[in-house]
Image (tube, rainbow, N blue to C red):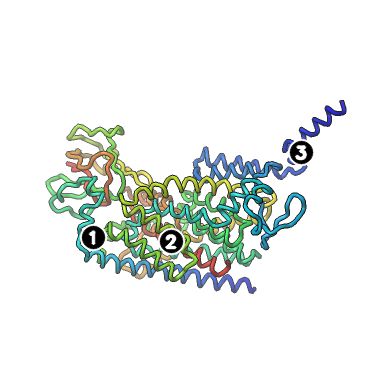
Amino acid sequence: MQSFSEILERVYDMTAISNIVSEPSYLLMYVIAFGLLYLGIVKKYEPLLLIPIAFGVLIANFPGGDMGVVQADSAGMVTLADGTVRNIWEMPLHDISHEFGIITYLYYALIKSGLLPPIIFMGVGALTDFGPMLRNLKLAIFGAAAQFGIFAVLLAALALGFTPQEAASLGIIGGADGPTAIFTTIKLAPHLLGPIAIAAYSYMALVPVIIPLVVKCLCSKDELLINMREQDKLYPEKNEVKNMKTLKIIFPIATTTIVAIFVPTAVSLVGMLMFGNLIKEIGPDTNRLFQTASNGLMNTATIFLGLCVGATMTAEAFLNWTTLGIVAGGFLAFALSIASGICMVKVWNIFAKKKINPLVGATGLSAVPMASRVCNGISTKYNPKNHVLNYCMASNVAGVIGSAVAAGVLISFLG
Amino acid sequence: MNNLSTGLLLMAAGMVTVFVILLIVIYFGKLLIATVNRLPDKDSMNSQNSAQAPVPAPQPAPAEPVPAATEAGNGIYDLITPVGGTFKLSPDSEGRRPNLPFKFKKGDVLCKITNAEGESSLCASEDGTILAVLVENGSRVDINDVLMNIGR
């Protein structure tokens, strides 16, 4: 009888139940994971990313499962199971895998090393068409205006007592660009990676709600009725693009060179973005590379990135007030970015004869291509013939470059 | 307080850099466009798009595109695509060509264009008749390509 109850006790200890009972905070993490899975599967909010992240959250929070990411402190020190303290950067990767489990291994090998975000950027580049931006180059400037939210929230977060590195990672959510946010956070405040990635991706998924909200607050009906095509007819563009194919091939090469000279820290993002775009635009000669970059490699990277980012959200790392601040700050950053883009258009319209639809400013916030589609939806609601999609794509794509440059600036100042 | 001044500095430096870089990209892009325009124009003629999507010889006076149609006089006008992407005929989702001339009502979806940004439907703004479909189903079209001839 004695031995039977002993065995039962052993079995009970083997399961996660004992740990969950002693630390009920895990239950809250399961609820969060199930909630995110629901949003991804049923509501279809960015399912390609949210589902790996949500499942990562789930598997990370079973004590004893060793699937959660173990974060080193700022000096790189971690405590092993036997109580000794070691510098994680001096540990070989197989030791990390042995001590902390396979997900921590993947996290340090693929994410902490900064490998995956540039690869995803390459895929994004391969899926981006710079054509609309090259046709309406002037509109690219609104991609810069809409980065204001990043810095405004950075300032607000500093005032609330975040460290500059944390504040910068929080602000970069306003760039509305998942890989950029992750890349910046890894460099500046890796302990906030989970919540920041979740905030960035869920607000990107909420773009169809946030943009109409801000537009409704700031724009009048007359402004939304501005028809860009008619404006183009009234004031035609001076230099029409005649040879788009050649231009599209030269553009990524030239832009990489310019950005690399001025903001070298942004090259890992902008450079890879433009490389992906270049192999797409060259056409049949590099088609095999393009296929890999935009499909196989991108999807592989997304799976690992999603799972590892989710797994950083262990109960002890996630359940604190900082997370709440990130959720609130992220929303503010998004809304401010959209608003500043719109305001810049309004200022522009005061001085210029050729009016611009304020929706073009709203899309300066990256979130390609969802933001453009949403804005096109708004404009066609007021006038079914008024398609602003192409003009929005111009500032939208420029916004990607803008937020990558902003990330480069933050990393070089604070990293 | 020290942190706040760091923040202000970052804000100023960051916004200025972002603006300057994009301004440079814009002006450099303009320069690039001007340069490329002077190059012999052989690529764009044989580019993939026009090879796959045989666009007929320009209709008499292809006027400025009104959101998706241009008038060529005598009640016949061209349906022009406001976005680039893959062309899909809509009256029949299987992609079979409608029996021409095909009568449609205001608000009917004439065709759909699918691209990385999603799917755009081109709706009829008034009643009319499709007289000719100029693009193969499933082929790539570029912005401002003529898709169909429509009669009032």
Using the numbered discs, state the Cα–Cα distance from disc 3 to disc 1 in whole angstroms: 70 Å
State left or right for residue B102 relative to residue A214. left
Q: Nearer the viewer, mark 2 or mark 1?
A: 2
Q: Mark on residue A242?
A: 1
Q: Quadrant of residue B105 in the image?
A: top left
Kindly indicate whether the residue at mark 1 contacts the one at mark 3 (C-beta within 8 angstroms).
no
Quadrant in which the N terminus of chain A appears: top right
The amino acid on which the numbered mark 2 sits, given as a three-letter code, is Gly
Name which residue lies at 27% across and 60% down. A232
Q: Chain of mark 1?
A: A
Chain letter of disc 2?
A
Residue under the point 68% across and 53% down: A320
Q: What is the spatial separation of the Cα atoms under label 3 and label 2, in whole angstroms?
A: 50 Å
What residue is rendered at 14% in x and 53% in y? B61
Is A101 placed left or right of A124 in the picture? right
Crowdedness near tag 2: few (<14), some (14–19) or many (≥20) residues, C-alpha within 10 Å: many
> Which residue is tagged 3?
A18
